[in-house]
Image (cartoon, coloured by chain):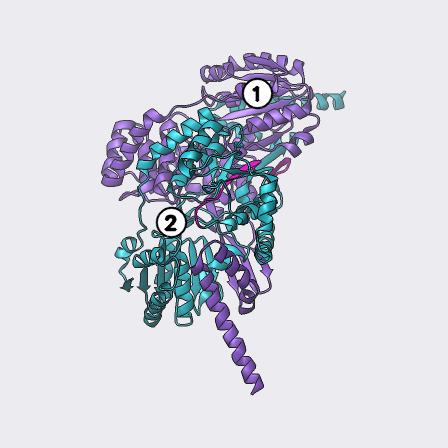
Chain colours: A purple, B cyan
Amino acid sequence: MNKIYNPNKDTWSEILKRPTQSVADIEETVLNVFKEVDIEGDIAIDRYTQKFDKVTLDSVLVTAEEIQTAKSNISQDLKNAIVLAKSNIEAFHTAQKTDKVSVTTTAGVKCWQEKRPIQKVGLYIPGGTAPLFSTILMLTVPANIAGCKEIVLCTPPNQEGEIHPAILYTADLCGVTKICKVGGIQAIAGMTFGTETIPQVYKIFGPGNQFVTVAKQLATKFGVAIDMPAGPSELLVVADDTANASFVASDLLSQAEHGKDSQVILVSTSKKMIEDVEKEIIKQCSVLPRKEIANEAIANSKLIYIESDQEALELINEYGPEHFIVCMKNEDFYIDNISNAGSVFIGNYTPESAGDYASGTNHTLPTNGYAKQYSGVNLDSFMKSMTFQKISKQGILNIGNAIELMADTEGLQAHKNAVTLRLESLNLEGLLKKNKRNE
Amino acid sequence: MNKIYNPNKDTWSEILKRPTQSVADIEETVLNVFKEVDIEGDIAIDRYTQKFDKVTLDSVLVTAEEIQTAKSNISQDLKNAIVLAKSNIEAFHTAQKTDKVSVTTTAGVKCWQEKRPIQKVGLYIPGGTAPLFSTILMLTVPANIAGCKEIVLCTPPNQEGEIHPAILYTADLCGVTKICKVGGIQAIAGMTFGTETIPQVYKIFGPGNQFVTVAKQLATKFGVAIDMPAGPSELLVVADDTANASFVASDLLSQAEHGKDSQVILVSTSKKMIEDVEKEIIKQCSVLPRKEIANEAIANSKLIYIESDQEALELINEYGPEHFIVCMKNEDFYIDNISNAGSVFIGNYTPESAGDYASGTNHTLPTNGYAKQYSGVNLDSFMKSMTFQKISKQGILNIGNAIELMADTEGLQAHKNAVTLRLESLNLEGLLKKNKRNE
């Protein structure tokens, strides 16, 4: 572990550097799959499922029977846990609903803003050893609250052509409208162009490996939106002597087990805490099943001692962590002044894994420094804001001249003319009325 | 003009097809400028300003003197118009502020969502014949309400090294923190990487030609966000016999004058209205200064007769227009049921140019069908939503087991362990208390 004491500001950008990924070499592969899926549809999908997932499927669509089997293969305890998590996520995301915003900006000029659901959304859930059913909760719950009409889920089958029962159970519980056994690049291509079986969607959500990441990027070139750019998961903990070294170490490790390229950083105003956390990490890591992965991530981790809260805060804001744990006596200083973080966890009893699963917040968060400009997934991610306006005769009389003048200055005569015609017609109307009164 | 009567649904996608732009051939040019600006900074910027804008500047930064000169070169009438527009835009975007959303999802588990400003934003305003100072209003006003700390504006100088006074006046009025005389690809590259003079920003907003569009796309690969993908401007009007053919024609023309690739579509339940609008377009177009541009856009326009409101609505939702004007007796049907549109203009006295300049709504809107999944620029475009959570001892006791079970099922033991350690410590604490009571 790299221990760094009172680093000079000049060195921050070097210290906080994230591992860079080169994806140029896989872009061509991804583009080829896209082209083939666009032209051949299901035939190309099947071919790539055979190639990458080593299985030939009778049907890409999950059947009602398979869902029934999945339900009976899940323990009641796990069902209860999923239902508790779902209920908390629902409560938090339902509270994010916003009312119509309506303003009469000038007499006779009424403007309003409304949010309406994105009609068709697609979710991607990776396969492999870890069945990320928790991500299904995180994406389907707000999609349903938003009112999305079609929620398509793509996830790769195993070599027996099956999907993990926890994924099927959760998808069914959360009202996914179509579950497709398709993985990787071909899944993203399928939802981008639509095939005979896979519906075309307007926005794609969800995690994935570097192939999926590049495929999602490419999808944006074909008119599909994505949740956010991807990157390795990361956690920054700021802790003083009121923190519990064993808890802090467990949090850093829970991030480190995600992948070899995960980033974990401890910032502390206490040298003792840094020593204690280091010892605890070594102790706890040795018994983890994913210790090899965790060890490699930990080797790149940074334990940074900084004397002042102000400077610690500045460094954290420069980094913009995806997950940010605050275990400090003066926690309010950090809560009030953090500008760039995906999700903030406060106090000794708020492990990051609470937010990953069951507290109610969303776990799809901006990483790789994107917390500086991107929101984590929230209710609004499944909606778009639309504006409306209705202007009365009096209204256009009130703002018409300003519009004419501005349009004229910008050299857009037709824009001006659209107002002039209306003003002239109203002046004529007024004149006629006046004449009538005078008769 | 193409008049189409009761088109079959099978033909809609063909009828509604937008002009496709091929940008592959300019991607290399853009990438090269990016590389040079990244490595050489201001030197590369100056070189490209000389090459593309045919001018050598003493200083890239606009001086206080230049702003003073601009102020005295603007008429009081135009100043008043700009101030009126600003005030309406401020009123509408201030109303979009949202409160902190706070929920106790389970006893002891408090979650909240807050929006915080994107610290550094960049605006691009094209040069050329039309000085788009109105876009400065649309972007700086919400940026200021959001609380963005740095607002950088890049706009190309003319061959005398000058910026249009209306741009300088508006930028100064709206509190832009730095105005740089830089245009095109090099401006976007400058704000992406930062140079000695141009600050690096986190998100770039604003319109531009195809070079700027490709440059903004490329910027997203270097960790910068953009407002939205670009495309030619477009307008769809739905009108029945209660509409005014002359007004409708003027609105269609105001969109058509933007560019040869602009799209204008009239959908009508009245055959007479289609005939009348066609005549009015021909009449009005002939006297426009930009009639050549407008004529070409009009040649590609569609006048579509559809008998039923329900079918008209479906067609409009399939298209997803950037601007949508409703001049119908039963306007509420369209207002309530439109799913995909950037901004909606209702009634005979609500020209689209009102929203372009002064009503208060934003004119930076999703085009090219992106209204299906993207919002127009609004207050939230300048902020990001962050979540926070604080869990008490009781809280983690309440949801801890659910987290353990879910993490375990996903094969993430370190995630589970972060909870287990806390639960064990609390159990121990409870035991000690119990023993103390029993003593």
Can you see residue A259? yes
Q: Which image quarter holds the N terminus of chain B?
A: bottom left
Residue A294 location in percent, x, y?
48, 17
Vertical side of A247 occupied by B162: above or below: below
Quarter of the figure with the C terminus of chain B: top right
Most distant residue in the bottom direction: A439
The secondary structure type at the circle numbered 2 is: loop
Mark 2: amino acid: Pro
- Which element is circle 1 on? helix
Q: Position of residue A31 (x, y in %)?
A: 30, 33
Give coordinates of residue B107: x percent, y percent: 63, 37
Is A438 drawn above or below residue A386 in the view shown? below
Q: Nearer the viewer, residue A10 or B391?
A: A10
Tell me: A178 left or right of B153: left
Using the numbered discs, state the Cα–Cα distance from disc 2 to disc 1 in whole angstroms. 42 Å
Q: In screen coordinates, is A249 left or right of A383?
A: right
Q: Which residue is mark 1?
A: A12
Tell me if mark 2 has few (under 14), some (14-19) or many (20+) residues whose alpha carbon lies within 10 angstroms of its own: many
Per the image, the residue denoted by label 2 is B232
User: Which residue lies at the image location 61% right of the left edge and 29% below the top edge?
Assistant: A350
Q: Main secondary structure of the magenta part?
A: strand
Q: Do the residues marked 2 and 1 share a common chain? A: no
Magenta region, residue range: B104-129
**Residue lying at 25% horizontally and 30% vertically, measured from the top left:** A50
Q: Closer to the camera, B430 or A324?
A: A324
